[in-house]
Image (cartoon, coloured by chain):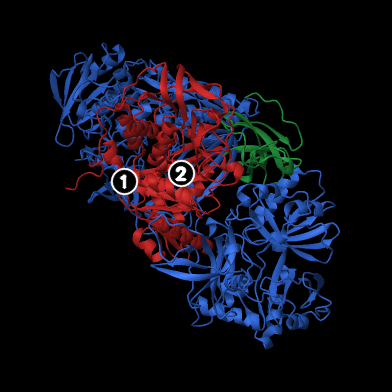
Chain colours: A green, B red, C blue
Amino acid sequence: MQLIPCPWCGPREEAEFHYGGQAHVAYPEDPSALTDEEWAQYVFFRENPSGPFAERWSHNAGCRRWFNAVRDTRTHDLLAVYRVGEPMPEVIA
Amino acid sequence: MTSPPGAHLPEHPDFLWDNPEPKASYDVVIVGGGGHGLATAYYLAKVHGITNVAVLEKGWLAGGNMARNTTIIRSNYLWDESSGIYEHSLKLWEGLEEDLGYPILFDQRGVLNLAHSLQDVRDSVRRVNANRLNGIDAEWVDPAGVKEICPIVNTSPDVRYPVLGATYQPRAGIAKHDYVAWGYARAAHAMGVDLIQNCEVTGLETSQGRITAVETSRGRIAAGKVALCAAGHSSVLAKMVGLRLPLASHPLQALVSELLEPVHPTVVMSNAVHVYVSQAHKGELVMGAGIDSYNGYGQRGSFHIIEQQMSAALELFPVFARAHLLRTWAGIVDVSPDASPIVGLTPVGGLYLNCGWGTGGFKATPGVGDCFAHTIAHDKPHPFNEPFTLERFTTGALVDEHGAAAVAH
Amino acid sequence: MTFRTPTGGAIDRDTLLHFTFNGQSYTGHPGDTLASALLAHGVHEVGGSVKLGRPRGIVAAGSEDPTSLVQIEAPFSEPMLLATTVELYDGLVARGLAGQGKLAAEPDPARYDAKHEHCDVLVVGAGPAGLVAALTAARSGARVVLVDEQNQAGGALLGVDEYVDERPSAEWVADVVAELKSTPGVLVLERTTAFGMYQDGFVLALEKRTDHLGFAAPEGVARQRVWRIRTRQTVLATGAHERPVVFADNDRPGIMLASSARTFLHRYGVLPGSRAVVFTTNDSAYCAAIDLAESGVDIALIVDARHEAPARLATECAARGIEVRAGHVVVGTEGAGRVTGVRIGPLAPASPDITVACDTVLVSGGWNPVVSLFSQARGKLRYDAELGAFVPGEELSTVRVAGSATGELDLNACARQGRDVGSEAAAAAGFAPGGQVPLPVSDSRCTARSGLVLWRVPGDDDASFVDLQRDSTVADVLRATGAGLRSLEHIKRYTTIGTAHDQGKTSGMIAAGIVAEALGVELEDQRPTTFRPPYTSVSFAALAGRDRGELHDPVRVTAIHPWHVAHGALFEDVGQWKRPWYYPKPGEDLHTAVLRECRATRESVGMMDGSTLGKIDVQGRDAGKFLDMLYTNMMSTLKVGKIRYGVMCGVDGMVIDDGTVIRVGDERYLITTTTGNAAKILDWMEEWLQTEWPHLDVHCTSVTEHWATIPLVGPRSRDVLAAVAPSLDVSNEAFEFMTWHDTVVAGVPARVCRISFSGELAYEINVTAWHGIAVWEALMAAGEQYGITPYGTETMHVLRAEKGYPIIGQETDATVTPQDLGMSWAVSKKKPDFIGKRSFARAENNRTDRKQLVGLLPVDPSVLLPEGSQIVETDRLPEPPVRMLGHVTSSYPSAALGRTFALALVRSGHERIGETLFVPVEDALVPVTVTESVLYDKEGARRDG
């Protein structure tokens, strides 16, 4: 079980968190202007890299805040955590 | 004196396969030497006469999810599309030992899918009725019936989530995973297929919208057609030709106990309590846990998932209290949004996709091998995999086995 | 005949313990293991082998033993323990196993628990290196946890009679342990095995707390405890296991590892036999031979595979009359059960030239560092050719290795490593060095690591056992390589080597060596097979801990729950909640009770406990705007004091939940969700708010458990409410449908909403949970004259189904849109966007043959369709696969309709109204008429009472 450094609470047990998949996938400005293909990309398609991945977590059993993290999906090492609205930091995997 | 408990297990044959150097080109290159890749190669050679085939495996054959799954085989899926391909698979399983000439220990000991809430009961009865109309053996059994089929299940009403009944598929069962993979590998090899291990695909080469070759850690290999059978690594491979897939790769853990005298005559699965367990031929209890929530390629999960699994297992099987956990491990499962696979053509000519099986790939091995080989040979989906296109995510024609409250695995 | 020495060993010779093994009675002493007590009686044969049924003995003295599997039968049955790790207690009953154990039929009475521990430095292993490391770290002020699998500290020192700092090593160990135990912030855990090493310093350890007490184990004390240790730094001082050499018929009882025999002598005061042959490739077995000889064992011969015996040790042997034959090997053994002799010959060619009679063979093929935890921590391993073993091959920032786990076999050097690594670990955890720990100096004579790496002696491959537990032989390995297998993982699977109870602790390295020889490759280029948790086996019950029975998952009950229990309600599990299902009167079954509850409610008044409905308080300037995005219909236009029904969809346009929205104030709404989805919907709202629309000024709070919620339903509900809320004008004009009022009910502040999930005149009375029971009882009293009837979820389901109201999760399954439910009226055409809207425009959503919610009336009004039945078009079933049109989602007998009815999802259902379809039930096809989903009071005349 990992320690996840919540940017608000500090490191906490993984079991306190809820996973939210890829970060920085914005809800489309005007969904009705999208083709079916473009809308399907938003609804169903996510990056699934083997390596650093910017993703969302929510500290569900703690402060209940959502935040972003960059994690190496090969090792599960968390390379960075940052708050919603902050730009993704440069990381070295 | 009774014979020792392990005396009757079949041996592997004295010869399995050669380890050739890759040739410069093949008619078909299959990426991924797991169960699906090996089965696809086998049916390409056997059914379609296509033998100039290479199976490329970055590690050792069948060392990925094929070596890490809990070997449950069943076809009692809700939707017509799913039950079609899984039942096709089950029928092939029923003749596979003879077909491959390999003792794969396919054992139709039946599977119970337990219901723990009134809605579970409705969903289960719905699935049983759908299965029967689809020609699949299925029945609804009450708690007493569960007890009769599997006496060690705790059917007392005084537990946290009492067993209210179960669906039962008698033809379901288990097989020995390595034996299955090696059976396919040996037979494919005997028909001329090259099995190339320690060969990682690093690039896919295309020209004018068509696949032409694969770049590998052992050099470039030209290919008329390329078929991806890489489970958890599918997204990474597809991205090499700019193809995005609606998949998330997650760790899925499993575990075994030490060898125990037979106590568990069937396979029991419970979605609500998150348990699936069988007792393998040698006597070890084989159990699967829930998938870890995050994307991961590390073949390693979190231990609290195992602890939850144990707590759930003892709810249903109090007799397991002093069984011992001997080994845990994880595979990487590629989960699609509707918990159904993606099998078929791609926008790139000559490139074929077989992925998204999530936790259910093992049981589909013969079925998808047969259908995928057909798809590759004819450049056209087999009717059984026709519904499982990539396009369904655009049109909305999902085959939602998640939403259908069907059971995983 | 006894094999107990007259003196020595860490056993209590004054106390006699009685035990039974394989039906025979024996005695032993406190401090014995089952294995040592058996050996004291000359019993080597423990069980049989799993495949060939050959006898199996005791090979090692500890948890690495591959063979001594036993079944405990009393005090409580437990399968597959090693005789070498079962501490002896009075009354123990056990039997030997042939590789397969037996589960107890009766429930395990023991308790198990788990404990969290946080520390700066965790030291695994209380041998010399671990002790020095722990003490060094402790003196620097770090919080230290020291775990060790044995019942006492000392590690390898427990098995020798060496002196440390010129006194018995046990005294040095005791001093170190005493200082550790008296240092604040230090925790020493004996009988505790670190079995799993995960990320971020998370280590799992199993403490066996009462196993060794047997029948005397106190009740109420957890038998085993899983320690969940979170540490900054870890020192692995896990030691090394001696490994054997494989030769023909190497599996006979009486053949054991040399160092283990030495351990049995020094720790337990037990001799392995009367006459032993020692077969070694290195120095350490000489010490075993000398010690045993001095204790009275006739050492017939030392066979040293090396060309030259070590001069000093050979001289010591000669002084004791022990013959040493260098350049020789054991080629085979003899014996019907236990070994009776060995055949010895030169190393090359390995052919026997003499046979030596003996009852014991002591083998040493070198040492394998225990690297399981290091490997689990993702540390890379390196092959050490001199040692013939994999050793830690890199440094990790939080995991350090000391002692023989590194491949260092000299005790003084191990201790020095312990000090260095303990100090580094403490420093890395932020602690400045404390008082220097003096390094112990031992008088060990057998410290050289200069061994010969020898995996096997050529011979009868079929009888040369690599994995004694799996009956896997050299022949099996060669057959695997001959079959074309190259990867160790494949060969392991082909031969099953390393997959047994011991997970290949003593056999894995040898198998790798034999494979490398067979394939002509270097072990440096081979990847060892993966070490997986757990290091030693752990009972399921220990891992489940206390999360069993009621604690398996929390039970949630409402404030009114005690009343339901007292009044005989049966309960339904809905999520974690216990909800009253129905309230049977004596002699009633589900159907009769529900018909009575329905009738009472429709004809007079009924009430239920609706407190489990999810309730979320939504506040903020943008609350309306936000709810407009969440619901398919418009909420921002709702007036304060009014209530609106709403549907929520996922981005894929499928219904995920429904409920009511009441506008409490300009910037405040209270929404309800289905019982099972309450937490999910709150999370859903938070996710959108925080990650997509953080600019919106909206705050959401769960208030589910703040309120007790009582729907009061039926034509008499107004009278009942009026009686308990005298200040409230309950007239239809003053209190309109879909409005709410704050008032006083039964003397307490209440919010009353006029909503109906049954079509009847109805009020939903909300009070703070504290007052739930009082208000419930007041309503019961006030309604008595009308025959007020409490009802449960089943009646609620019937009443709503008669009105065609869907239950999310019953009528829907994540493939159903609001339009499919006939709820286009609840889908806004005005709003530019809401979650799910875009998906409604997809091709699949616009098919005319989607499954739609309709009613079904069996042609025979007494036939009840089973829920979950499928629906077909024809009155005769064709051969499978049969085309199915949909399924029955709900089905009930109806008191109000005087017949049975059902709700169903049917392909093109809305167009099929009036058609006859068929429902296969058992072997019959039941004809049904498709109707609208609303079957009762279509005009809505009953709503206002």
Q: Is residue C525 above or below residue C747?
A: above
Q: Residue at x 38, y 67 (%)?
A: C923
Q: Secondary structure at mark 1?
A: helix
Marks 2/1: CA–CA distance: 18 Å
Q: In the shown orientation, is residue C381 left or right of residue C263?
A: right
Q: Is residue B273 above or below residue B182?
A: below
Front-most of residues B181 and C454: B181
Q: Position of residue C820 (x, y in %)?
A: 62, 58
Q: In the shown orientation, is residue C664 left or right of residue C373?
A: right
Q: Position of residue B278 (x, y in %)?
A: 38, 49
Crowd band around label 2 with a 10 angstrom C-alpha radius: few (<14), some (14–19), many (20+): many
Is residue A70 something one can see in this rendering? yes
Crowd band around label 1 with a 10 angstrom C-alpha radius: few (<14), some (14–19), many (20+): some
Q: In the shown orientation, is residue C744 left or right of residue C283?
A: right
**Which residue type does callout 2 highlight?**
Gly
Q: Residue at x 27, y 21 (%)?
A: C280
Front-most of residues C611 and B201: B201
Look at mark 2 in the image and give the residue it sits on.
B360
Look at mark 1 in the image and give the residue it sits on.
B94
**Which residue type does callout 1 highlight?**
Glu
Q: Chain of mark 2?
A: B
Q: Chain of mark 1?
A: B
Residues flagged by tags 2 and 1 on a common chain: yes
Quarter of the rendering containing residue C12: top left
**Are the residues flagged by discs 2 and 1 in contact, CB closer than 8 Å?**
no
Q: Position of residue A87 (x, y in %)?
A: 75, 31
Mark with earlier residue (2, 1): 1
Q: Secondary structure at mark 2?
A: loop
Q: Position of residue C827 (x, y in %)?
A: 72, 57
Q: Residue at x 50, y 81 (%)?
A: C588
Front-most of residues C915 and C654: C915
